Structure formats: C-alpha cells, structure tokens
Image: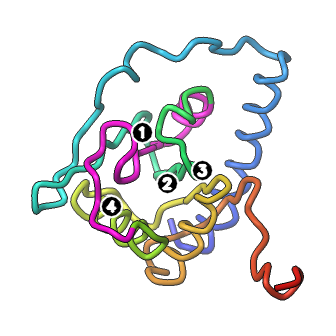
Amino acid sequence: MNKTHLKAGGALLLVMMFGQARATEAGHAPALQRMPDSYAQAAQLIDLGHGRHLNLRCSGSGIPTVLLESGAVTDSPAWFKVQPLLAAHVRVCAYDRAGFGFSSEGPLPRDLDADVSDLHALIQHAGLATPLVMVGHSLGSNIVRQYANRYPADVGAMVLLDPPAQDIGRFAPG
C-alpha cells in the first residue's frame, strides 16, 4: 500500500469509523457503557530504557496501524469505546503518556518535545509498523502534529479531534 493510498483510504475509513463511534455513543447502536476490567491493569509495558516504560494497549489486525493520542490529562482508557470499533477493521493502539495510567514518569520538563520524543521511542521499541494513521484528541492533536513534522515518514495520515486553536497568539490579545 503506498502512502498516497494510505492517506486517502485510511483517513476516509477512520472518518467513517469515528462517525460510527459517535452514532454508537448517541444510542443509535448498542454501546459499551462500562469500561472493561482489562483496563484495570497494564496491557504491554514497553521498555524505553533507563528504567522507563510506557503502557501500550493494541488490538485488532491489519494495515494501517492506527495510533490514538489522548487529550491533556487522559490516558488509554479514554478510548475504550472507540478502540474496539476501530479494531474490527485495523490494528489500533492507545498508550499512556509518561506519568499517566501505568506508564513511568518521564524526565522534566514534560512538554510537547518530551511527549513527541517519548512517542517516537514507543513506536520504535514496540516495533509498530509505519506509516501510522495518527489520531489526536485535543492536546493529543498538538503531539500528533509535532510528531508528523519531526518524523514525516512515520505518518501516513492524521485525524484531529477537537484540536486546540493553533497560533492563538495571532488572534488573542497578549
């Protein structure tokens, strides 16, 4: 599958699946209402070296792999309704950023660069097949965007959900 095909087909597939997920949440289809017990424990702890690890939760199979990036103060369980819907069609992974869920703390300062570096290390150490379709929610949109800028060959497509305004300084008084 070439990158152009992945961008067009993968992004369209994700938009349709997220539409299905939204319909499920709205009550148009049966939905999981309770988080599965499996979220009460770590899934796969990926060793990043130096005594650090990030918790990675993957399901499904196929190409492309979809990586779910959570919002500001959430972790992989934030995707517990969406991940199974996507996993019916593709391999999908969500993870806990440093200091969240079952992941180790990361070195300070914890900023966008640190999150992008951790994400890159996670993808490499977990052996996730690239290019990925990256889905970012809220703050996760900034992480996904920065990751795509830094590692463009790793990203086949992006889906941004409720992204924060970019270049807010140009629009808001200082």
Badge 2 marks a residue whose secondary structure is loop
Sequence-earlier tag: 4 or 3: 3
Closest to the camera, between mark 1 and mark 3, is 3
Give x and y (percent) for residue 139: 62, 59
Sequence-earlier tag: 2 or 4: 2
Sequence-earlier tag: 2 or 3: 2
Closest to the camera, between mark 2 and mark 4, is 4
Badge 4 marks a residue whose secondary structure is helix
Decide if residue 35 is on the left or right side of residue 174. Answer: left
In the rendered view, tell whether residue 129 sits above or below residue 77.
Answer: below
| Cα gap from disc 2 to disc 3, whole angstroms | 22 Å
In the rendered view, tell whether residue 173 sits above or below residue 136.
Answer: below
Q: Which residue is mark 2?
A: 64
Q: Which residue is mark 3?
A: 71
Residue type indicated by callout 4: Ile
Sequence-earlier tag: 1 or 4: 1
Residue 93 is one of the magenta-drawn residues: yes
| Cα gap from disc 1 to disc 2, whole angstroms | 9 Å
Residue type indicated by callout 1: Ser
